[in-house]
Image (cartoon, helix red, strand yellow):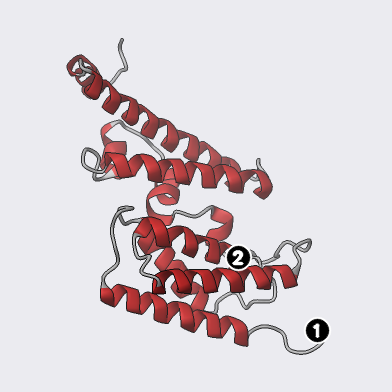
Amino acid sequence: MNSGSPSVDALLLKLTNKGEREVLDQYADLFAILKTTEKLERAYVRDAISVKEYEPACLKLIGQFRTLWDSLRSSVPDVEAFMSTYNMQCPMAAHRLIKSGVPGNQEHVPTRPDPTASSAIAVAETVQHFITAMDSIKLQMVAVDQIYPLISDLVTAMGKVSTLPPDISGRKNIRGWQTKLYTMPASYELGGEEVRQLLFDLESAYNEFMANLPRGGG
């Protein structure tokens, strides 16, 4: 087998036992996820795929990447270095998977929110996500793999509230936490100061969110 890359060929010659072959399989999976994400991102930018199709596909790839990378961090501590080694030109995938961790349509507040979404339902869901996140942290659920999904769901829910001003500080703070948590190992547990700051930011964002809801008229 000639892959066209001396480093890959050398690796293939060395991988003779089951454990080593499993590592190669993981490398191949990582390569495939990066390439697939790059194609998806380019299709989204070119408007060749709808948001309805793009978002779930992107979320699936982000989840697959996160799960795989958690098991590969010891051998692939730097994914961008991995990409350079195997001559992968995937800048959009690198941003989406390594730095952002959220689909492109969620990363930037849409200027025209989905008109079919019920504002009342969106508000109720956001309030529930705020409460769930704050209560979970108070119950000492402070590992990244426990907190990140809660914060991610909250960010998504806030993005569906069409009446919310696009640049309120609370949303920016929560997104900042989403990005920060995404780059951490799943098993990492937040320390006391981090937990205190996260709770403060959540409570502040919640109060700001409630203050910006329309008044009157039911």
Image point (42%, 51%), residue name = 95
Residue 30 in sight in this render: yes
Residue 103 image position (x, y, % from top left): 53, 52
**59 sits to left or right of 211:** left
Residue 130 image position (x, y, % from top left): 53, 73
**Dot 1: within a 10 Å radius of its alpha carbon, few (fewer than 14), some, or many (20 or more) residues?**
few
The answer to whether the residue labelled 1 contacts the one labelled 2, judged by CB atoms less than 8 Å apart, is no
The quarter of the picture where the N terminus appears is: top left
The quarter of the picture where the C terminus appears is: bottom right
Q: Which residue position holds label 1?
A: 218
Image point (65%, 42%), residue name = 49
Q: How many numbered marks appear?
A: 2
Q: Secondary structure at mark 2?
A: helix
Precedes in sequence: disc 1 or disc 2: 2
Quarter holding residue 121? bottom right
**25 sits to left or right of 34:** left
**Dot 2: within a 10 Å radius of its alpha carbon, few (fewer than 14), some, or many (20 or more) residues?**
many
Residue 85 image position (x, y, % from top left): 26, 34
Residue 143 image position (x, y, % from top left): 34, 60
| Mark seen at residue 2 | none
Please, which residue is most extreme toward the top here?
A: 1
Nearer to us in this view, 40 or 160: 160
Residue 169 in sight in this render: no
| Amino acid type, label 2 | Ala
Nearer to us in this view, 192 or 174: 192
| Mark seen at residue 157 | 2
Image point (46%, 67%), residue name = 175
| Amino acid type, label 1 | Gly
Q: CA distance from mark 1 to mark 2?
A: 21 Å
- Compared with 97, 14 (above or below) is above
- Compared with 183, 193 (above or below) is below
Image point (46%, 77%), residue name = 202
